[in-house]
Image: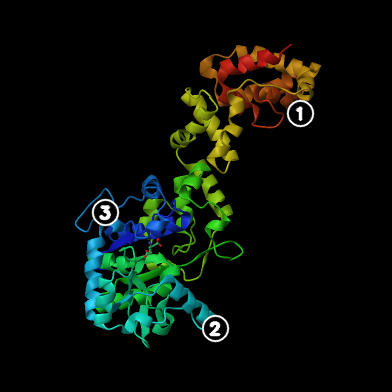
């Protein structure tokens, strides 16, 4: 790719960033990274009725917290700004006026009632429901009069009647859509705001966007956009429509199926590394048969050619698997930082770093997301409370023999020798010395040190707890 790559993620601030939006953002970001291009964030807030308070902050924070930073956008003004469409109204008005003057757009004064009746009639006659072009033929004088009378109006593009729009989509190849399927789209609304179609085309041109990567749901809007590019005599960007996201039963993934916001996944204990990796593979795959990628790997490997045409299955079990993998394999100090809030929530004192990391090394093998971490760790910190059934086991003669032996033997070890190898030797020695083996040997120790019959092996338990805590725990259960 020789030309400068300039791409944009252009969300409408109608809610929190969800995984579908994240995929669009990510693919744009990756293309920019791969070709040393520019990634732009543009807020498409021209539909004031759908604006959701707090969503712009959420969009930006979610992207940045996942490591997908943008080069130009809100609070990162550059020559092409402002990046909120609501701050660009004058620009749009200028171009709408140009289209009207050229005869490529017209004022429409139809009322809501008229439009409703039109639609009802078309439906009754089993026709495609679209604007019937009633105001196309108003004379200049009629328009002038209506404007002078302050009649509310919108502006519509004048779609040619019998044109075949033929364009190349980098994923789908040649796409043909007949203009008769496309209506005279409103480009300027009664409230003076442009619609998405006009604003996006004008901005993509002025912001020198080279590739438009967006969801497949916009494929059928592309003729409207091409119409505008042709009317302005502008060069079109390259079109890349990303495959739909599907549930495992191949139905369309939609918000109705759950809270797909990035924030929700982060709150549920998913790592940003897993989220990025998972989302990257929703419709893209590498040349080799490989599943695990960091953001940096992806920036090198990503290519439009490997985005698939067919819908991408959203399989949560794959995300769980990846999340577990990252939890087990990323640096333990980093995992420790991420887990800290969960321990803080339970008032568990993790100031002993060495112990904390040992606890995590063991606990992270048991979990698929971070919210489960304390469930597998708190027994190393909190006092052990045993049920009557367990107490009975611990109080038996054999058990007491084992516990006493341990207490005495471990007391003899100095702190420097408290290492796994020695502890393993001692654990074996105990079997010989006490003459007790199997569960009669292991259960009492595990119960006293861990609170359950099943769990880590004895040397690991001793190693995690350390000498002092081990002795204290044993003492508690020695009668
Ligand atoms: N504002 C549109 C959306 O939220 C952007 C579509 C596009 O990328 O052109 O889906």
Q: CA distance from mark 1 to mark 3?
A: 64 Å
Q: Is residue 97 left or right of residue 318?
A: left
Instruction: Give the mark nearest the N terminus, 1 or 3.
Output: 3
Tell me the quarter of the picture where residue 31 sits.
bottom left
Residue under pointer 3: 72
Residue at horizontal 39%, vertical 65%?
Answer: 214
Q: Is residue 37 left or right of residue 19?
A: left
Circles 1 and 2 in contact, beta carbons < 8 Å:
no
Quadrant showing the N terminus = bottom left
- Name the residue nearer the viewer: 421 or 471: 471
SS class of the residue under badge 3? loop
- Residue 56's spot in the image, x, y percent? 37, 50
- Residue 385's spot in the image, x, y percent? 69, 21
Q: Is residue 190 above or below residue 369?
A: below
Residue found at the far left of this picture: 79
Q: Of tags 3 and 2, which is closer to the observer?
A: 2
Q: Is residue 458 above or below residue 150?
A: above
Residue under pointer 2: 126
Residue found at the far bottom of this picture: 162
């Amino acid at each position: 790719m020789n030309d400068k790559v300039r791409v944009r993620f252009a969300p409408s601030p109608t809610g929190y960033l969800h995984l579908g939006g994240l995929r669009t953002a990510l693919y744009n970001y990756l293309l920019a990274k791969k070709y040393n291009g520019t990634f732009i964030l543009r807020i498409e807030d021209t539909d004031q009725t759908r604006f959701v308070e707090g969503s712009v902050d959420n969009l930006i924070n979610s992207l940045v917290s996942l490591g997908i930073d943008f080069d130009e956008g809100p609070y990162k003004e550059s020559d092409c700004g402002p990046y909120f469409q609501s701050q660009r109204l004058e620009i749009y008005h200028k171009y709408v006026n140009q289209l009207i003057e050229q005869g490529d757009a017209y004022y429409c004064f139809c009322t809501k009632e008229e439009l409703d009746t039109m639609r009802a009639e078309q439906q009754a006659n089993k026709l495609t429901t679209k604007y019937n072009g009633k105001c196309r033929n108003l004379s200049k004088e009629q328009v002038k009069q209506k404007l002078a009378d302050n009649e509310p109006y919108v502006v519509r593009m004048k779609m040619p009647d019998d044109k075949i729009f033929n364009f190349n989509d980098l994923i789908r190849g040649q796409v043909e859509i007949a203009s008769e399927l496309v209506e005279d789209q409103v480009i300027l609304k009664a409230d003076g705001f442009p619609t998405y179609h006009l604003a996006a085309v004008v901005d993509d041109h002025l912001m020198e966007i080279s590739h438009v990567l967006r969801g497949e749901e916009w494929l059928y809007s592309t003729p409207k956009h091409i119409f505008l590019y042709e009317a302005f005599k502008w060069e079109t960007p390259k079109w890349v429509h990303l495959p739909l996201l599907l549930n495992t039963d191949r139905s369309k993934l939609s918000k109705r199926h759950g809270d797909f916001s990035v924030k929700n996944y982060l709150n549920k204990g998913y790592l940003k590394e897993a989220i990025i990796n998972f989302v990257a593979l929703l419709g893209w795959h590498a040349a080799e048969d490989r599943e695990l990628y960091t953001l940096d790997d992806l920036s090198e490997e990503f290519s439009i050619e490997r985005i698939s045409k067919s819908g991408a299955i959203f399989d949560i079990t794959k995300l769980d698997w990846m999340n577990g993998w990252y939890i087990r394999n990323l640096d333990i100090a980093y995992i420790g930082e991420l887990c800290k809030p969960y321990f803080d929530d339970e008032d568990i004192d993790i100031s002993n770093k060495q112990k904390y990391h040992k606890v995590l090394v063991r606990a992270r093998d048991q979990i698929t997301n971070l919210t489960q971490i304390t469930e597998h760790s708190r027994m190393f910190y909190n006092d052990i409370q045993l049920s009557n059934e367990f107490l009975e086991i611990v109080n038996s003669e054999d058990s007491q023999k084992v516990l006493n032996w341990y207490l005495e033997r471990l007391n003899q070890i100095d702190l420097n020798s408290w290492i796994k190898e020695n502890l393993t030797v001692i654990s074996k020695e105990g079997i010989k010395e006490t003459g007790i083996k199997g569960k009669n040997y292991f259960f009492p120790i595990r119960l006293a040190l861990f609170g359950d019959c099943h769990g880590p092996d004895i040397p690991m338990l001793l190693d995690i707890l350390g000498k002092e805590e081990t002795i204290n725990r044993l003492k508690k259960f020695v009668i």
